[in-house]
Image: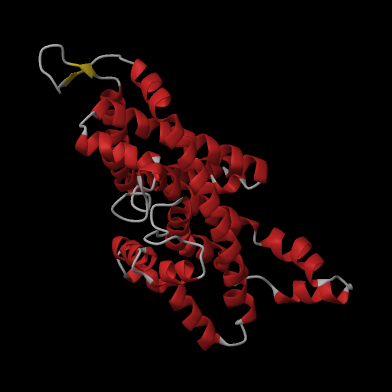
Amino acid sequence: MAFTAFSSSTAAAEPVVRRKSRVALFLLLPGIFYLILFFVTPLISLIITSLQAPDPLLFGQFVNAFNWQNYVTVIETYGEQAVRSAGYAALATFFALLIGFPLAYFIGITLRPYPLLQSLALVLVIAPFFISFLLRTLAWKQIFSTEGPVSGILSSIGILGPGESITGTTFSVVFGLTYNFIPFMTLPIYATLVSLDLRLLEAGNDLYGSPATTFRTVTLPLSAAGVMSGTLLTFIPAAGDYINASREFLGSADTTMIGNVIETNFLVLQNFPAAAALSLLLMGFILVLVAVYVKRSGTEELL
């Protein structure tokens, strides 16, 4: 009897488990639909476009094919711009980390006893998001232009010659990338530091650890997840950015990045297979780099 009762209760519980699994699947359907519509479909379209070949009958038109030579051609043609993009993005990420970590530490730890000042400082970090990315970059173009205050000061002390400006140089592009993506570096680090138990820092001081030792052995390891997230959120969009390096903003023909090449091939040259191949190569490069970076950093949970 007891065995029969146990069996019946187990059988009665099984439909509940199945019902829960169906509900979970139903709740996942909007996300799955979103991924298929806005990620899988464009990705398949890019792959098909990247393998197209020129139409032999109609100039400027392309037909579906398996022309994998498109990838070889774009690598040989635009390899310099790809290396430059990776270098600019790495520099911008490095400088954003140099600025963003002390800023996040100041807001998350130093200002913790002063909630009002902490909230105000956090608002100042987020404030640039309320202004258009294009307008902020255009404003720096005016500041760095020949008639701008920065060029005027540098010309007066002999660093710049008459009529020269900072715009169109490596410095201006890296500066623009760093400035525009500093919030993406600061906020993840702040999120980890604001929850840091200050008693751990006090314990480091009680054990006669210097501030540098306490930072290296306590603060930095506990904020590693925020640093990792910040570097990824900065490097990934910076590598594909096409605004800061554009000649209409802070760049020139000598500072062209891979994003500018993709934009030109899509909108000006209308070489869609080349643009699609470059986009897929950029995506693959970033995915491999992120996987290796996260793996070597020991924070696989971020994936």
**Position in image of residue 225 (x %, y %):** 61, 56
Q: Outermost residue, left direction?
A: 58
* Res 198 seen here: yes
Image vertical order of residue 233 relative to residue 22, above or below: below
Q: Nearer the viewer, residue 27 or 132?
A: 132
- Answer with left or right where residue 275 lies relative to residue 119: left
Number of numbered tags placed on the structure image: 0
* Res 229 seen here: no
* Residue drawn 71% across the image and 76% down it: 198
Q: Nearer the viewer, residue 261 or 285?
A: 261
**Position in image of residue 207 (x %, y %):** 88, 72
Image vertical order of residue 249 relative to residue 122, above or below: above
**Position in image of residue 31 (x %, y %):** 33, 46
Q: Quadrant of the N terminus?
A: top right
Q: Outermost residue, top direction?
A: 56
- Answer with left or right where residue 192 lies relative to residue 200: left
Q: Nearer the viewer, residue 260 or 35?
A: 260
* Residue drawn 57% across the image and 76% down it: 107
- Colour scheme employed for the rendering of this structure: secondary structure
Q: Nearer the viewer, residue 62 or 218?
A: 62
- Answer with left or right where residue 73 lies relative to residue 113: left
Image quadrant in which you'd find residue 129? bottom left
**Position in image of residue 74 (x %, y %):** 37, 25
* Residue drawn 42% across the image and 23% down it: 76
